[in-house]
Amino acid sequence: MFKSRKSGILLHLSSIPSPFGIGDLGKDAYRFIETLASAKQTLWQILPLCPVDGSGSPYQSTSAFAGESLFISLELLAKEGLLSQEEVEQAEQAPFANTDYAAARRLKIPLLQKAFRNFCLKTPPLDYNAFLRKNQYWLEDYALFMAAKAYFTQHRAQDAEGLLEFLHETKGFLPEEKGKAYFYAAAWCSFPKEMRERKPQALAEWTEALKNEIQWECFLQYLFHKQWHQLKTFANENEIQIIGDAPIFVSYDSADVWANQKAFRLNSCGFATVVAGVPPDYFSETGQLWGNPLYHWKYHERTDFQWWICRIRKALEDVDLLRIDHFRGFESYWEIPFEAEDARSGKWVKGPGSKLFHKLKKELGELPVIAEDLGIITPEVQKLREKTRFPGMRILQFAFGGDENHPYLPHSYEKNTVVYTGTHDNNTAIGWYQNAAEKEKDHFRRYMNVTGEAPHWEMIRLAFSSPAQVAIIPLQDVLGLGEEYRMNLPGTAEGNWAFAFQWDMWDEGCLEGLKYLSLLFGRNCG
């Protein structure tokens, strides 16, 4: 897939500096691309661009197709005349130390609503109608889903007792406190029966009743996709490719599940019978209980994997290359009973294997995919990755303190590999070294013949010098940041997804260091 040695940076869009609480598609994103180009980097890896959940996670989204509307740049809307420059400047705050989703919503949503009202007063541009036509296959369901969620959140919150009774009868999610019922009211499982079951007459009636709210959702997606593709074009013009991220599973409370209920393991009431996760591992002694509904793979096979074809085609329209999260789940996945308290009671169940990827390649051609083959990797998983010819991943933080030929040590790599110092789920390099066991530190120092005084740059150098065709470095490691700047701690529900950098963190040494290592180890190639 990669014809030459490359390197790049892992940084989510939310982490870019912003006066609105969250990184967006405006001028600082363009500046970041220019900075990458100056540092002789040719790849920018991001996390999923889809709408985040209440904790800020992009891995529990309301859609696998939609974009997060908070990423829309108000500055660009002012340039288009949908807002005034004065309105945007009045909303600006001092740069945020961390991503703050609540502040971003407070600052941006009123102005996005004002832009929508201004948009409705004009004749829609041709590209708007073209966007609606091209994306109708997912946007129609998504917009109705989001409009209905907003409507029922508002109205069901006034009847918490009735909602609790409904949830009890259907064995649904019972909140601990009645005051929390409003949150659960928004889930599609609490829609009226005809809407839950997607009866054609109910869909038509609610589409008419919520037409203004549906248009609002379509407007947001139009703006997001327009601004994103403008930024992606700029990146490509600067010889930088975007690596996107596709989670293997989708959220239960999503347009994807509501609109495709036969494609998931649900009971007659619409609730998941089994859910996703992983067994006990490096990150958790009790495993990880993700809670995503599992796929009904026989249904997907009967329908020639059409949902997956649509999903991957859309993803590859939005990015140049695609990391598929939890690749091993396509060979075998960890199936956990819905009522389980943690992941230990799960079991391995066979996935679709090569059938899915054979169909995807037949429909879409050669797939520019990176397989996230981490965790418990069996010979069967390895065989599947080799059959697809997707490059796998190696994490340097997992390499030290064990076997002298550990597969994550660079001398064990095959060429078709993407090496990381760490991912969004890992500590920073400095944080890892400070917390590592002495055995790991000793191995780390002896392996590279270094002192350990600058473990982040020592690890970056090891990644760049490795046989792996691609090296990706989290920006935190380039900037030499400690563990308080990590992006996510798996198995925890709070305090994640908040990392944001400031431009004064990126000094000349960071830029020159990346440039030097890229040239030294032949990674500045076209």
Image (cartoon, rainbow, N blue to C red):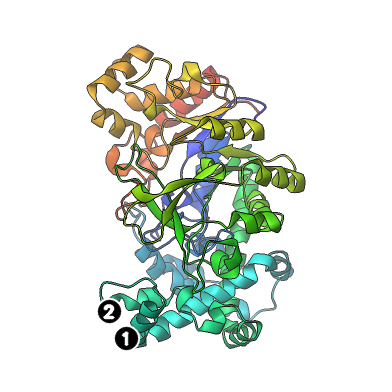
Residue that mark 2 sits on: 178
Q: Mark 1 touching mark 2, by CB under 8 A?
A: yes
Determine the image quadrant of residue 52.
bottom left
| Residue displayed at 42% across by 62% down | 53
| Residue displayed at 33% across by 77% down | 181
| Residue displayed at 58% across by 20% down | 522
Residue 45 seen in render: no
Q: Amino acid at mark 1?
A: Glu
Residue that mark 1 sits on: 161
* Residue 211 percent across, percent down from the top left: 60, 83
* Residue 232 percent across, percent down from the top left: 61, 48
Q: Give me the C-alpha separation between circle 1 and circle 2.
A: 7 Å
When the figure is inspected, residue 216 is found, relative to residue 359, above or below; the finding is: below
Q: Residues within 10 Å of mark 2 (few under 14, many from 20)?
A: few
Residue 253 seen in render: yes
Q: Residues within 10 Å of mark 1 (few under 14, many from 20)?
A: few
* Residue 141 percent across, percent down from the top left: 61, 71
Q: Amino acid at mark 2?
A: Lys
445 or 330, nearer to the observer:
330
When the figure is inspected, residue 279 is found, relative to residue 522, above or below; the finding is: below
Determine the image quadrant of residue 220.
bottom right
When the figure is inspected, residue 333 is found, relative to residue 68, above or below; the finding is: above
